[in-house]
Image (cartoon, grey):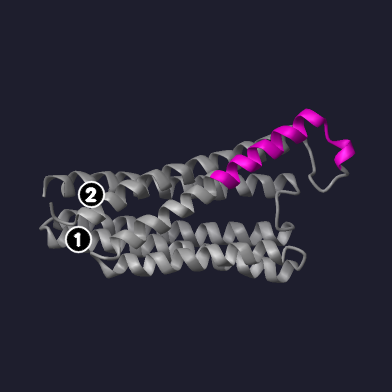
Amino acid sequence: MTFPKTLKSIKLLIIAQILTIISQLLTIFVAGILISSSVNITDNLDNIPLHLLLLIIGLTALYLLTGVASVILCLISTHKASAEDANFKVAFYSTVISLFLYVLSIVFSANKEVENITELLVLLTELLAQVYILEGIRSICKQLGHPEMDKLGGFIYAVITTLFVVQTCVSVYILVLGGTMVTTRASWLSIVGSLLTIFSMILFLCYSYKTIKILSKE
């Protein structure tokens, strides 16, 4: 079989993409709860109904778990595939940097300026990881004689780059509003950002599935 490590890695990436979609859906659910109940999470916790508070905490915990699992799978898969294409190595290091920046944003959460900058850098490094995973798949498909996958990959590259620009604008505005879903407007914008991420992941899922079919036949 040609590129066996890449085949296994892309299968892991599909699971990571599904987990990312789940985590974004959980974000939408939390934002929807805040909007529908008119709850401001900056209020005194005594003013928030216990059942609602427990639901928000539970969904947030699931969001964190699925997010962490997705990153771990992405690290494992890109590291394995890097043995067969150098683009995956760049994606691996981009994911490592993204994880480091995310932890940094949590550590410095009390300093809004540092937190805001690191969160924007997280978005950038996540885009780099996506782009180099895409380039790695395109490179392998070209070597196997599938130019149509290269064209499709170019289209997806243009789409995710455009989505990144829009999502960055949304994230900047959310940060201006307070950095979290503290207002109804910020919650709606958070939903928009999550939908953009989900759309991007669905594109990647379709492309990854096509790639698996090609690699399985080689």
- Residue shown at the point (35%, 55%) measured from the top left: 77
Q: Give the range drawn in magenta.
A: 45-65
Mark 1, residue position: 140
> 215 or 179: nearer the eye?
215
Side of 13 where 6 appears, left or right? left
Q: Which residue is drawn at 53% across and 62% down?
A: 99
Magenta segment main secondary structure = helix
Q: Is residue 62 magenta?
A: yes
Q: Which residue is drawn at 29% across and 64% down?
A: 135
Q: Position of residue 92 (x, y in %)?
A: 40, 65
Which amino acid, mark 1?
Ile
Identify the residue position indicated by label 2 in the image: 211
Which amino acid, by three-letter code, is at mark 2? Thr
Query: To which quarter of the image does residue 160 belong?
Result: bottom left
Could you say where residue 89 lies in the image, as x and y percent from the top left?
34, 68
Look at the numbered discs 1 and 2 and tell me whether their residues touch, using CB distance below 8 Å: yes
